[in-house]
Amino acid sequence: METSLYISGIGIAAGLIHFILFLILLFRRGKRAGEKLALVYILFSFLWITAVTLAHLEAIFLPVVTESARALLPVLALALAVGYLTCAALLLEYLFWPIIATAGYTWTAILLGATVYFLFVPPSLLPLEQMSMGSWVFFTLGAVILLTVGLFRSRMAFHRNRALYWLLTANALSLGQVLTLLPLGPLQMVGPLVHILGAIALLRGVLSFWLPNVKAVLRSIFRFLFLFTATALLLAGVVIAVERLTAIWGVSSTNVIILLAVGVTLVYLPLYQALVRLVDRLLAGVGFDPAQTLRDYSQTISTVLDLEQLAQTAVQTVSQVLDIQRGALLIASETERGSLLLRPVPGLGEVSTDPVELEPISPILARLKEQDTPLFQYEVEHHPVLREALPKEREGLRALEMEIYLPIRAEGELAGLLALGPQRTGEPYAPRIVEFLSTLAHQTGVALQNARLFAGLQELNAQIMQLNESLRAAYERLERLDRAKSDFLSIASHELRTPLTQIRGYTDVLNELVRSDALTRDQIARITENISRPVRRLERIINAMLDASQLETGMSFHFAPTALAGVIRMALEPWQEALKERRLTLTTSGLENIAPIRADMDRLTQAFSNLISNAIKFTPDGGRITIEAHPLDDEHFEVTITDTGIGISKVDQELIFEKFYRVGNIDLHSSGEYKFKGGGPGLGLSIARGVIEGHGGCIWVESEGYDEERCPGSTFHVVLPYHAHRGPCRWKRPGQEG
């Protein structure tokens, strides 16, 4: 009876405290989901404590009241277990927490309804108390397991500390419920008190994202208990010694106490200091000289001008005294639109080198610029303001797996961040450690500015070298093209003079025969044919020059439905005699497999004719030429023209598509249209490229190089769309950027 009264008194006080906690949360504005769940939990806690109190006041209330309260205790305890499991899942950011809440509270409501029903309609047909307590064990173990998994899965110290905090809170609440519900006599009085501590911890946890360092608190408690126990044992030994010595010596106990007090004092002070040093080895603290470390660090970085070396020096200095797992320098630079780009320079461990961009309106950027204090990754993920940052910013910082970011400023501006990962001890950074790291980051400012200037000079020097190389290559290209234009004048004059000479010669012969009246019909036919041949040759050269001139002003195209096989057939027709005379084997494949296309048939025929002519000219007698076609995708197909010719050198493989450019010795040019290595005006391939690109396609050549003995051959690739269009080619070559 007396125990019940004590429990009831403690229950009334506990209920009052729970009600105050409930009001604190109830009148808090802008409650987040975690605070709302905590509000529900504390409400159930108040109801549970009330039921506990009523169940022990049998002398005041009627039995129906106390029995009803006692019957509701297991169901209310189940509601508490469901509530805490839901809170744990939400705080650990598991997406399935609404499922837990719905299922748990639905089951609780069913048991509550059954319990109330059988209170008014006895006897109970179901073991409701056992079902409620079994469910309480299930949900309580679920919360403990969930928090334990979160504790061991977390790699960040602050997240691990958070999980440990909630795990201890769960244990306190569960222990309070167990001590209260089980018939443990006087120990039942401790239950509500332990539950109060758990409820206060719950309220503290949901109202602030900064939680105490649980391991440090536990170590401090252990330190106090250890020293308290050692001192108590020593004093107890003194008391026992006084009693024994008084009995043995038969002297006054006062004299013995004075004598022992002097002796114990001489022993206790060094003993106590030894005990303190022994215990302090278990505590987190600064086990090095910060001032000496900072002096050594300042001297080391004064001569460092390389960003990577600076990052390694800074991070490894910290690693030597704190044993961190990873670290990096984040170099800060502003973009044109005002955002801040953080480029990681790894210093220790595996660190992502992907840059992190903070938008101009980012709360993280505002925090770094406005406050000269360290930024913790824990803040980025849990601070109400910083959580409003864009997901890409938070994900970018999370990918670095850093624990703390220390601002590095140069001339008052943010130059970068010293990013450090968690300590191997798994504990959050202590305040004294953070102060040391902040000073080290401040000392890094000047060195970082110098290293950035040096890196800028190196980059500028590399750009100048690259520019010089580009200018050299452009100069060589211009020289080649200039020589090609000069060669064109020589070749073109010969190409024009030869047919004109032939025309003039046959015309003179015709005049002589007319004057001598010796002209027969067969002679007229033969002479006119000989005149017609150079005229056609002259016409083709002039047309090629006109087409080449249109490359600058823009060729005109008339797209219409056509077939690739027909285009290739017409392109081959003028070269049948050449193939036969040079004993060249030409094969085609895949042309019929290409669906009908929309293109300028005449222009496309001209382009392929020029490519076939080029293959004939640079393939020795008896060689092979292969024309193949195959689809690439739904919009494009490819045609390749492969020969077994003398090949093309690497430096010429792009230049051959320029106007007037031709390979080989210009003295070997010939007015023959298909003679081996016979040159022309150097316009055929440039016209072919202009036609292909005018259809929205692309053309390039591949060859091992130039070799007249081995004859490695060349392959011209032509990619065309099924439906020709103006504009650049939409198909990209494998490995081609953009």
Image (cartoon, grey):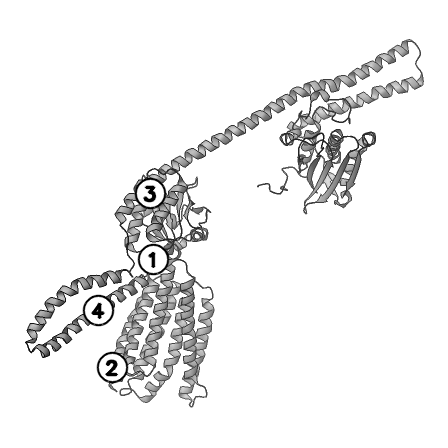
Q: Mark 3 points at which residue?
A: 444
Kindly report which numbered mark, 3 or 4, lies closer to the viewer in this rendering.
4
The amino acid pointed to by label 4 is Ala
The amino acid pointed to by label 3 is Thr
Q: 642 or 114, which lies in front?
A: 642
Q: Name the residue under label 1.
A: 428
Element marked by disc 2? helix
The amino acid pointed to by label 2 is Tyr
Q: In which quarter of the image is residue 250?
A: bottom left
Query: Is there CB contact under 8 Å for labels 3 and 2?
Result: no
What is the distance, in whole Å, between disc 3 and disc 4 at their CAs? 46 Å
Q: Name the residue under label 2.
A: 6
Kindly report which numbered mark, 4 or 2, lies closer to the viewer in this rendering.
4
The amino acid pointed to by label 1 is Pro
Q: Residues within 10 Å of mark 1 (few under 14, many from 20)?
A: many
Eyeballing the image, is 115 above or below 529? below
